Amino acid sequence: MRIFSEIKELVRVEKNFTQKVLRKLMVIEKEKLYCDLKYSSLYKYIVKELGYSDAEASIRVNATRLMLKSEVALTKIESGELTLTNAACANRILQGSRDQQFIEDVVGKASGCSTREFKKIVSEDYQIERRETLVLSEFMLLKFDRLRKVYGDLSTHELIQILLEKELSAPGKVQRVRKLSVKNSRFIPKGVKREVYTGECANCGVRHGLEYDHKLKFSHGGDNSVGNIQILCGACNRRKEIVARGMNLFC
Ligand SMILES: [Zn+2]
């Protein structure tokens, strides 16, 4: 019947357009272009500007990030071997991993199977895949011994967990600069930091992952005065760097 061949052709065209959209999203994510529209993330941009639902946006953001991490994933998504849902699921498993072998392994498992099958494989293999061995120097072990005097006789693993929790739960955390302020230094004096701190990104208004930024870069003669320091989120700060370096290839 004609309707079957017609719908087949429409689906082929639809898939083609989805891939074109993903290619554009890759550029927008890579260059943090959404910051130009004052969005703090690709996700927010996709929901507000493109009208996708939360779930649709989440799948597209994760698939886009996976495509940026792995050429293999990009090829497989474009050939149809890797579905968007599985690509998104694979990216969530990878989180921030840059281990190319681990990435390719997860991509391989995600390809050519249903989401249910992939999730089953993952639940069986995931614990092993994410395990990481740490080699600690004697110097670091001594530091853990010192921590035990504060936290009690806990294992190194438990101490690392406490430190991670503490670090990740700090509210409105601004990237800390450890070195003390020195004259003619790029490190911003505490008094200036206190004065300019607004608790939100000057560009997109987001309230987490904030960084201090020199409006006129230190290397271009910008100083540490209140007028030259602002608060930006990580994405807007990266975007500013990209624009400054003239890496604006696609717009
Ligand atoms: Zn921002």
Image (cartoon, rainbow, N blue to C red):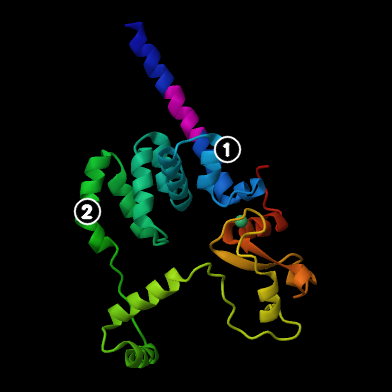
Distance from the alpha carbon under mark 2 to that under mark 1: 35 Å
- In the picture, measured across the screen, residue 207 lies left or right of residue 132, that is right
Under circle 1, the secondary element is helix
| Residue 114 picture location, percent across and down | 26, 38
Which residue carries the number 2 mark?
Answer: 123
- Is 57 magenta? The answer is no
Residue for point 28% across, 48% down: 109
Disc 2 marks which amino acid?
Ser
Under circle 2, the secondary element is helix
Which image quadrant for residue 37? top right
- The answer to which of 235 and 140 lies nearer the viewer is 235
Is residue 95 depicted above or below 11 in this figure? Answer: below
- In the picture, measured across the screen, residue 97 lies left or right of residue 127, that is right
Is residue 80 depicted above or below 156 in this figure? Answer: above
- Dot 2 or dot 1: first in sequence order is 1
Residue for point 33% across, 75% down: 161
| Residue 49: mark | 1
State which region is magenta. 12-20
